[in-house]
Image (cartoon, helix red, strand yellow):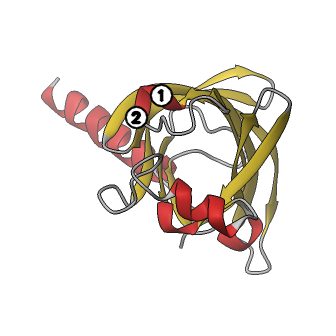
Amino acid sequence: MKNIILSAIVLLMISVGVHAQTWKIDPSHSSIMFNAKHSGIAFVNGRFMEFDATVQGGTPQDFTGSKVAFTAQVSSVSTGAEGRDKHLKTADFFDMENHPTISFVSKSFTKSGENKYKVTGDLTMRGNTKEVELTAIHIGSTKTRDGLDKVGFQLTGNVDRNEFGVAGAAGSVAPIIEILCNVEMSIQK
């Protein structure tokens, strides 16, 4: 009986190890963007130019149960207006001096439809961590020139910036910020 249990544990560990792949974001083919409603009449969009992300687990066909870790450099925020970008880095918004990064660490990655997942995790901005839910659409899978697996996702969601202390320009910038990320990831050797 003891040998059967040990054999089962070894098989379980091997099967977990086989599926514990690491996927790394391709920054040159990915974008981390946001939209903020301004004055109630238009949207200002922006993006982070410097970021990193990895996913542990998943296959080219199914990412159920995967773990996501993401970090963006606040210094790289870009909205196409230099003055606004400088203002976003101040204590009115992201407070880059004290909080140079924005991060997300997933708690769950569950299938919610065909090629669709619900990703729940902790988002941290300005030292404040709140649980958020994102929708991830698996766009497709292919192979790199080296024969490694490559996948594409689009992630969307909304966050209330006030909950994170990113409360500047309250009279002209809406509290709800739309997130849109287009991501290509390759499996690591």
Mark 1 lies on a secondary structure that is helix
Horizontal and vertical percent position of residue 100:
38, 61
Label tally: 2
User: Is there CB contact under 8 Å for labels 1 and 2?
Assistant: yes
Horizontal and vertical percent position of residue 12:
36, 37
Mark 2 lies on a secondary structure that is loop
Residue 29 or residue 61, whichever sits in front = 29
Horizontal and vertical percent position of residue 31:
72, 58
Residue 111 or residue 49, whichever sits in front = 49
Residue 98 or residue 137, whichever sits in front = 98
In the picture, measured across the screen, residue 1 lies left or right of residue 140, that is left
Residue 143 bears which disc, if any?
A: none
In the picture, measured across the screen, residue 59 lies left or right of residue 114, that is left
Residue 162 bears which disc, if any?
A: 1
Mark 2, Cα crowd under 10 Å, few <14 / some 14-19 / many 20+, is: some
Residue 165 bears which disc, if any?
A: 2
Amino acid type shown at disc 1: Asn
In the picture, measured across the screen, residue 147 lies left or right of residue 130, that is right
Do we see residue 121 in this rendering? yes
Q: Image point 40% across, 60% down: which residue?
A: 96
Q: Image point 71% across, 49% down: which residue?
A: 60
Of all residues, the one furthest to the top in this rendering is 112
Do we see residue 135 in this rendering? no
Cα distance between the residues tagged 1 and 2: 5 Å
Horizontal and vertical percent position of residue 168:
51, 39
In the picture, measured across the screen, residue 107 lies left or right of residue 40, that is left
Mark 1, Cα crowd under 10 Å, few <14 / some 14-19 / many 20+, is: some
Q: In this view, does 111 lie above or below 25?
A: above
Q: Image point 41% across, 57% down: which residue?
A: 101
Q: In this view, does 170 lie above or below 189?
A: above
Specify the quadrant that holds the N terminus: top left
